[in-house]
Amino acid sequence: MAEDEGSRQGGGVSGEEKDAVIDNMGEFGLDPKAGLLPFQQDMFKDIMADVDALLVTGQGMGLHRLLVSMLRVHCDPKSLVLVINANVTTVELATEELSLSTSFPPKILSMDQLSTDRRDIYLEGGVVFVTSRILVVDMLMGRVPMANVHGIVVPDAHRVIPTSSEAFILRLFRHENRTGFIKAITDSAQGLVGGFNLLEKVMRSLWVSQLYLWPRFEKRVIDTLSTRQPEVFEVKVDMTSTMQLIQLAISDLMVSCLKQLRKLRPSLEMEFLTVERGLFPAFDQALRRQLDPVWHTLGFRTKQLVKELKTLRTMAKYLDQYDPVSFYFYLEVGERGVFGGQSVVHRRLGRRAARVARRRERAAQEAKAKRQQRQRRGGGGDRDGDGGDDDDDEQEEFETTIPELVDLGTDIIEEADQQDDSQRGDGQQSDMAVPPDEEFRRHYRVLQPDDLMFILPFYLPEVGVSTARFARILNDVKPKTIVFYDPHLACAREVELYQSAHPEVDLHVYFMMYRTSFQEQQYLSSIRHEKEAFERIITAKRTMALPADQDGRRGIRQAEERQLKTRLVASRSSSVVGASTRRGGGRVAEGAPRPKVIVDMREFRSSLPSLIHEFGMDVVPVTLIVGDYVLSPDICVERKSLPDLIGSLSSGRLYSQVLAMTTYYARPALLIEFDESKPFSLLGSGETLSDDIEFKNTMSKLTLLTLTFPSLRVLWSRSPHATAELFYTLKQHQDEPDATAAANVGEEGTHNEEDYALEPMVVLKTVPGVTPHNAYAIMEKVKNLEELTQLGLKQLQEVAGKANGRLMYDFFNNTTTVDDDDKGHDDKKG
């Protein structure tokens, strides 16, 4: 088919070469017991044949099993393979499976382990699961033996963007190691089509040049899954008249809200604003992402419409999942809270839906009363019997697999039957009347594992549906009948894979859903959206032009990134800082050392350290007590985003931070960094600057802060990219900071002022070039002020630094220039 040709073209290795490379699957350590289907084995060949590649599959196509097969190859102490960007469920399941099938199980690194222990784990080799925040710090600190790293595996590769920590890790790895592999996998095609050239940005961040696509409509996938299909029954239930009324009301209101939103904001993407898109949670995020740059200019009506669309989507979801009583309770609470007095649309919907829900509740209560009446007439229930075990009795807890649990239950029942038979043989009467054996076996029997029914909820609100865990349940239980109460695309495909892997099982699948409901529409839309995403990726792949040095193995890309950025900044700053024009416009000389920036450990949650390194500066991670970034022995920067700035000013925390910086550094700076997608302003829509100081005003608080600390400099940055360029400019002609000294700044007990003479210390701090940072170092190396004034330029620069030493030398030797008029005036006065 045409889609198949488009999805397979452009591979880095031809079919003949690939077959020659992987003629023997055992070469990669692939165990036939891994249970890979034929098309999954082809996927395994693709990702293992190319050194650096990105593999994209459809949802529910066994990507977890492919990941486990890839890692099983490298569970060897001779090679070190790092796995980053893996979620908790993937780490748990993969570690458990590999621990049972390999002699060298993988290891998991966490913040609880010491740095020395992590270094030893890296040296041991094998597969290591590590979080991005830990790994980037270990790489910068030299704890990871980069030469020993055989490669890096990146699950959920669609989340790797240029400013992410994973992109920073891969850049550090490729700069130091040009032979190791980078293999990225993902099952989210929709995550690669949003935005402009997102696919190229992701591949560039991953440092891969080969792309393999495996959609559900790929020919080999169809051939494999069509050999054995489960018997599927669609159980579609008609919605009640009241449910149809509520659904119609929700649909009409969503159309009305979207229509009003189009009128208020014509700049939004029209094809995106549909009721079908509004049924998915991603709609809220995408809509907010488009409105974020102008959110401060939006009126109350537009913001309320965005909120109403989210509430309507939640109501549409609850309509299919909740029973009448629960749905009525939700509407009743919403009518008092969300609906109460905020929106005419919501008040109308609340009153209408609440009336319908009340009728549904009354009907449910009447049906319940009729059932109870029939039970009383039939004499059902044991009125005088014991109500069961006491709630306070402790229950024995044990962990076992599902097959072991079934066998255990069967053994207990058989043992109970044997004891009962022996008691009857001894003439003992049982408390309960037991029918004869023939009658007993006619109506009662021991349940076998094949007859058991499991109701297994595998949906968790915090992580959603785990298809890998669902696939594990299928392989453990091996059911013959599966009932989907809520249809899910990935889980439905996992059932297809299970049937193909176990053709001996006569599988029956029941899909339960309301006919013409939001639930059915959402399921069908998810299939269509994934297909459209793959078609867009196939089209982009045909026209995508990747540079020859995309993988960075030749070292060209690294040199280009560094030279282009440093040359640009140097040319801009040469006229400002007085760089010599004889050196080609201030260009950085070849082989010049990279500038160094000391970064606090807590700052690695942001994207700024990655951008600083990409800009051509070395990043040194240190736990800082004072400041967030140290650019030189005199320059310390405290970075604040806009929400953090407002909170720090309100709590008074910023005052303490600035006080510490002014105590220990000569040039403290407060950096206010804005989001590049939001307006570059501290004032909201309709706000104006006031002539008076107001306690609740952010600008007033910032003004008072600068008046209290005159030496504080306030820096403004439009985005993290602008901050990296600003840091590079500030470091021009400055001494490099010392990591050990920066870490010791602010520690109590570092310097005891009682050990020094008070009056000479006060006089010393008034000398130009003496800062709180170098004052104690000067007093440690110089006996008194007289000896200090006799030191030469080089000696002063060794004690106080290059720039500060020059200031002190000029002050002591009176080499400052004085105007002739001032000289004459002084002579006359003398």
Image: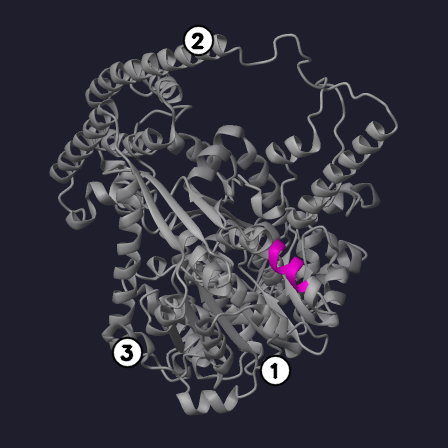
Residue 641 or residue 501, whichever sits in front: 501
Name the residue at the right extreme.
426
Q: Does the magenta portion include 93?
A: yes
Task: Establish if 128 lies above or below 558.
Answer: above
Residue 26: assigned label: 1
Question: Is residue 77 in the magenta section?
Answer: no
Q: Nearer the N terminus, badge 1 or badge 3?
A: 3
Quadrant where the N terminus is found in the figure: bottom left
Numbered disc 2: secondary structure: helix
Q: Which residue is mark 2?
A: 373
Q: Which residue is mark 3?
A: 5
Q: Mark 1: give few (<14), some (14-19) or many (20+) Cα within 10 Å.
A: few
- The residue range painted magenta reads 92-98
Work out whether 751 lies above or below 164: above
Which amino acid is tagged 3? Glu
- Closer to the chain start, of discs 1 and 2, is 1
* SS of the residue under disc 3: helix
